Amino acid sequence: MSREIRPPAVIKGECVGCRRCVDVCPSFVLEMVDDVAAVVRAQWCIGCGHCAAVCPTDAVVREDVGEV
């Protein structure tokens, strides 16, 4: 079985602009846009979850579906 990979989502109102998610992403999925993290290359996401793990405000969320 394989896992469907969904890119993270950023809750803009919760993002404090620390760049941790941007800096930790090995696939360059996130960038800062107007001082807020934004998903700009969703198709490059490998589903590692590092972005969500380092976010101090839980503004980066993952919505993996599970086994498919």
Image (spheres, rainbow, N blue to C red):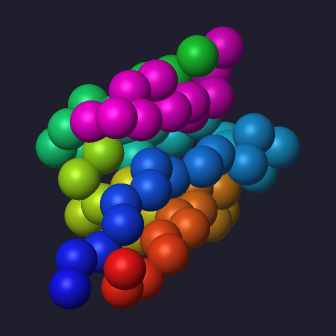
Q: Can residue 56 be seen here?
A: no
> Which x, y percent locates residue 59?
65, 56
- Furthest toward the right, the residue is 13
Question: Which is more toward the observer, 31 or 45?
Answer: 45
Q: Can residue 18 be seen here?
A: yes
Q: Is residue 16 magenta?
A: no
> Which x, y percent locates residue 47?
30, 60
Q: Is residue 13 left or right of residue 63?
A: right
Up-down: is 16 above or below 36?
A: below
Question: Which is more toward the observer, 34 or 68?
Answer: 68
- Quarter of the C terminus within the rendering: bottom left
Please name the residue shown 27% across and 36% down the image: 44
- Furthest toward the top, the residue is 34
Q: Is residue 63 left or right of residue 52?
A: right
Please name the residue shown 44% across and 56% down the image: 6
Numbered-mark total: 0
Q: Write down the region rendered in magenta.
A: 34-44
> Which x, y percent locates residue 26?
16, 43
Q: Is residue 37 magenta?
A: yes
Q: Is residue 54 left or right of residue 45?
A: right
Q: Is residue 13 left or right of residue 22?
A: right
The quadrant holding residue 2 is bottom left
> Which x, y percent locates residue 60?
57, 56
Please name the residue shown 83% across and 43% down the image: 13
- Quarter of the N terminus within the rendering: bottom left
Please name the residue shown 36% across and 66% down the image: 4
